[in-house]
Image: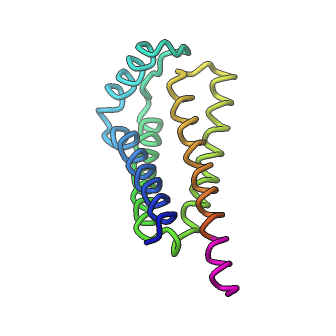
Amino acid sequence: MQPLEKNFSRLLIFSGVFNIVLAAPLILPEFTAVYFSFLWDVNLFLSLGGTAPIAPQQAVNALLVNTAGIDLVLIGIIVIYAGLAPAKRLFIPVINAAGRTLFAGIIAYYIYTYNIAHIIALIGAIDLIISIGFVYFTLRIRKANKNVNDQ
């Protein structure tokens, strides 16, 4: 693996682990309230502002949070898989970057409209930085592959 691809691999694996670590606590039905409380404590410690998150009270809403947690962990696993051979799996980081960018935009909406806990903005900012990295490395690898094919 070339240095460019190794660095891309590191970013992909980091971002996959980031997904898994942040989303895994959302999977367990009775743990959501504890996790929301933990995020709020971190939010307060960092003096980020916003309003405290409240765990879903209705079963269907809790189920949607648990399902989102499962989905985000699975996405993290897929991104780690892409990190094992980034040049061969460029579609995964590109589509993931699009999703992360959309997520950051939706976070901005919820912070502006509902003043949700601003720790979520920090998560969105990290996702946006990851997205920029994915696009950067994808373009660099595509250009390097094009140069090799042109020779």
Residue 82, above or below 55: below
Image position, residue 89 (x, y; %): 52, 71
Residue depicted at x 47% and y 70%: 2
Foreground of the two, 52 or 65 = 52
Image position, residue 87 (x, y; %): 53, 72
Residue depicted at x 35% and y 23%: 38
Q: Is residue 150 magenta?
A: yes
Q: Is residue 54 magenta?
A: no
Image position, residue 63 (x, y; %): 42, 42
Q: Quadrant of the N terminus?
A: bottom left
Residue depicted at x 61% and y 18%: 115
Residue 118, above or below 31: above
Foreground of the two, 97 or 30 = 97
Image position, residue 147 (x, y; %): 67, 78
Q: Position of 47 compared to 95: left or right?
A: left
Residue 18, above or below 76: above
Foreground of the two, 52 or 19 = 19
- Magenta range is 142-151
Please tell me how many numbered marks the rendered image carries. 0
Q: Most prominent secondary structure in the magenta stretch?
A: helix
Q: Quadrant of the C terminus?
A: bottom right
